[in-house]
């Protein structure tokens, strides 16, 4: 495979003033004004990367981890009918995006032979009791591998899922229940790490320096991908290829820096929503993963000087062509306060030909001897043209085709872009204090030891609350 031919291209033509107009477009001189700041950030990146602060950038080169994963998947090949992934947030969105992009859209409906004897794949990324209990109607617990994924080893939602299925495993397998369990967690600390040592449960570890939303190319995403037959070597090769491109110091050669700077400049102008709109069902879950990456990385109350700035663009997902019929009316005629990012596939894996038996019906005959591939391309281009003519800033990531190599590139482009944009805002991209507040309150409400004072505080506030209910 020619790597250059599979390179994702970043087309930012429709945010530039020569195409969008002077009122809402960006002048090239504005971009050039940031070159000095980009250079400073770039060299700071290099220094911090040497210190291990940007561990996610080294993930494509983790040969030892990959060999361990591939060895284990080979050992258990054909042993399980189903795989159930227990995780939430960064422990699930990346693996789900990989599966949606790189496996058959009706993967679980295929026969074992069509799946290459790989197990059916289920991702339980929420704790809705109806959904959790319903999985027992479609999997045989005795023939299912349950993977418990939490970097901290103690995420309440994931541990609750684990406890539920642990009891089911013990009921069906007795003391052999451990053979149907896999942990993916911190290598040194946490409840799952301790439990794995005590009960001899197979474990893959997550580099402690890699945050959850950046962890898709750790065992969090690599193991279920490899188990279902995805070429994880190509996935990492694509990520490594894009990592090199995203290390260019020159702004106009670096798609991650450009994407981040464009977002930042429009944010300063009050355009604080970024809508990611793939024209591909297979890429829709990448938009889902991007939402967490962008929201948790850039949504911060304080900057590094501890000054309150309440920063953060709002990431929204939409699906082309579906949301042309549900959201585009608002995007075209509503507030002009958004930036749009299209994901465009240039060559789909399948071609769907169209034939019309209605020569006298103009509503159908214009589609005769065309393909659905041509139609979705025309729909994307038409939306792009309409947005641009209506002065709605938009940009496009052009994907030659959806394969492991190109999907690996996506994860690195956006991860580097998030880190870079955080520097423009002067915030800590890698923490998430807003999430922690909710976790503490949940622990208190559920009676976790050590949170009694918080529980009492919540009880007092609830008692004093004035109810307004219709």
Image: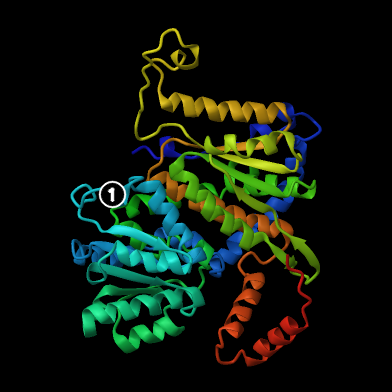
Place of residue 367 in the rendered image (x, y in percent of width and height, measured from the top left) = 44, 17
**Residue 230 or residue 115, whichever sits in front:** 115
Q: Residues within 10 Å of mark 1 (few under 14, many from 20)?
A: few
Tell me if I can see residue 6 in this picture. yes
Query: Is residue 292 toward the left or the right of residue 331 in the image?
Result: left
Tell me if I can see residue 241 in this picture. no
Place of residue 148 in the rendered image (x, y in percent of width and height, measured from the top left) = 39, 72
Query: Which residue bears the numbered disc 1?
Result: 109
Place of residue 451 in the rendered image (x, y in percent of width and height, measured from the top left) = 61, 89
Residue at the (45%, 71%) spot, across then down = 207
**Residue 172 or residue 466, whichever sits in front:** 466
Residue at the (55%, 53%) spot, across then down = 290
Place of residue 146 in the rendered image (x, y in percent of width and height, measured from the top left) = 32, 70
145 is higher (above) or lower (below) than 328: below
Task: Tell me the quadrant of the picture where the C terminus can be found.
Answer: bottom right
Query: Is residue 77 toward the left or the right of residue 400 in the image?
Result: left
Residue at the (45%, 42%) spot, across then down = 281
Query: Is residue 42 toward the left or the right of residue 103 in the image?
Result: right
């Amino acid at each position: 495979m020619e790597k250059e031919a599979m390179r994702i291209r970043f087309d930012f033509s429709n945010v530039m003033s020569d195409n969008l107009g002077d009122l809402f477009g960006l002048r090239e001189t504005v971009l050039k004004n940031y070159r000095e700041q980009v250079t400073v950030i770039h060299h700071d990146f290099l220094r911090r990367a040497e210190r291990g602060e940007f561990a996610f950038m080294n993930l494509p080169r983790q040969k030892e981890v990959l060999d361990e994963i591939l060895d284990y998947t080979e050992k258990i090949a054909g042993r399980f009918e189903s795989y159930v992934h227990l995780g939430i947030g960064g422990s699930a969105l990346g693996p789900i995006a990989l599966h949606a992009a790189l496996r058959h859209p009706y993967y679980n409906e295929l026969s074992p032979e069509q799946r290459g004897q790989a197990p059916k794949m289920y991702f339980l990324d929420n704790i809705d009791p109806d959904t959790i209990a319903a999985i027992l109607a479609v999997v045989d617990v005795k023939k299912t591998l349950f993977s418990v994924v939490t970097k901290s080893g103690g995420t309440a939602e994931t541990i609750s899922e684990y406890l539920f299925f642990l009891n089911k495993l013990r009921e069906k397998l007795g003391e052999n229940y451990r053979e149907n369990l896999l942990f993916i967690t911190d290598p040194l600390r946490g409840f799952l790490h301790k439990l794995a040592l005590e009960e001899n449960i197979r474990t893959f570890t997550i580099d402690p320096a890699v945050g959850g939303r950046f962890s898709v190319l750790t065992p969090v995403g690599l193991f279920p991908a490899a188990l279902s037959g995805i070429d994880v070597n190509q996935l990492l090769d694509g990520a490594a290829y894009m990592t090199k491109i995203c290390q260019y110091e020159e702004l106009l050669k670096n798609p991650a820096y450009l994407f981040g700077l464009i977002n930042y400049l429009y944010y300063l102008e009050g355009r604080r929503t970024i809508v990611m709109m793939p024209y591909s069902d297979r890429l829709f879950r990448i938009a889902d993963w991007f939402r967490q990456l962008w929201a948790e990385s850039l949504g911060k109350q304080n900057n590094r000087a501890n000054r309150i700035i309440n920063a953060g663009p709002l990431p929204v997902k939409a699906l082309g062509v579906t949301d042309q019929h549900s959201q585009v009316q608002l995007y075209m005629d509503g507030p002009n306060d958004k930036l749009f990012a299209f994901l465009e596939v240039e060559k789909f894996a399948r071609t769907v030909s169209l034939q019309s038996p209605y020569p006298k019906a103009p509503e159908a005959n214009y589609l005769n001897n065309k393909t659905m591939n041509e139609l979705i391309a025309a729909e994307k281009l038409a939306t792009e043209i309409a947005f641009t003519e209506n002065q709605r800033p938009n940009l496009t990531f052009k994907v030659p085709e959806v394969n492991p190599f190109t999907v690996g590139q996506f994860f690195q482009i956006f991860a580097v872009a998030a880190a870079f944009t955080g520097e423009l805002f002067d915030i800590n991209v890698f923490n998430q204090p807003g999430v922690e507040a909710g976790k503490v309150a949940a622990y208190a409400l559920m009676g976790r030891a050590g949170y009694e004072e918080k529980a009492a505080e919540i009880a007092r506030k609830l008692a004093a609350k004035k109810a307004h209910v219709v």
